[in-house]
Image (cartoon, rainbow, N blue to C red):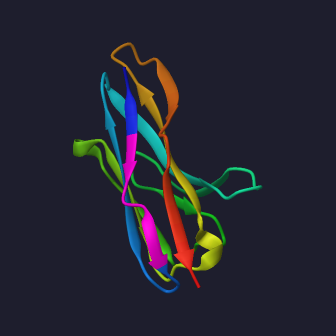
Amino acid sequence: QVQLVESGGGLVQSGGSLRLSCAASGSIFSINDMGWYRQAPGNQRELVAGITRGGSTNYADSVKGRFTISRDNAENTAYLQMNSLKPEDTAVYYCNALIGDEHYYFIRYWGRGTQVTVSS
């Protein structure tokens, strides 16, 4: 069984920083792309940043220049460094990963989310 567990959320003042972590565990043979999504109350879940196994990244326009996604393939972990946080970044942040088993059967998994609250 595969699990994604996020950590690092919390309450921070506008302009502050947080670093989120997403650790994958369980029966894992390979992890392809990983990503961070967020969902604010009343809004749809949206992509914040994604990263391929090779390290190519993409970002939502709203976070470009402020957020940085990275990963440690040896540790099956992804990170999201969030700087210059704004109140509109307040949301539950979810980790997502495409994970394959030894038969190269891939499934997309979600974490349970971590709350990020930015006060003005």
Q: What residue is rendered at 40% in x and 71% in y?
A: 18
Front residue of this view, candidates 32 and 84: 84
**In the image, residue 72 lies at what x, y percent?**
28, 51
What span is in magenta? Answer: 5-12
Main secondary structure found in the magenta portion: strand
**In the image, residue 5 lies at what x, y percent?**
38, 42
**In the image, residue 85 lies at what x, y percent?**
52, 79
Q: Give the tally of numbered discs.
A: 0
The N terminus lies in quadrant: top left
50 to the left or right of 79: right
Question: Eyeballing the image, is 64 above or below 9?
Answer: below
Front residue of this view, candidates 110 and 64: 110
The C terminus lies in quadrant: bottom right
Question: Eyeballing the image, is 15 above or below 117?
Answer: below
Asked if residue 10 is among those painted magenta in the image, a careful observer would answer yes
**In the image, residue 63 lies at what x, y percent?**
59, 72
Q: What residue is rendered at 49% in x and 41% in y?
A: 112
Question: Which residue is most to the top?
Answer: 103
Q: What residue is rendered at 32% in x and 26% in y?
A: 28
Q: What residue is rendered at 44% in x and 37% in y?
A: 32
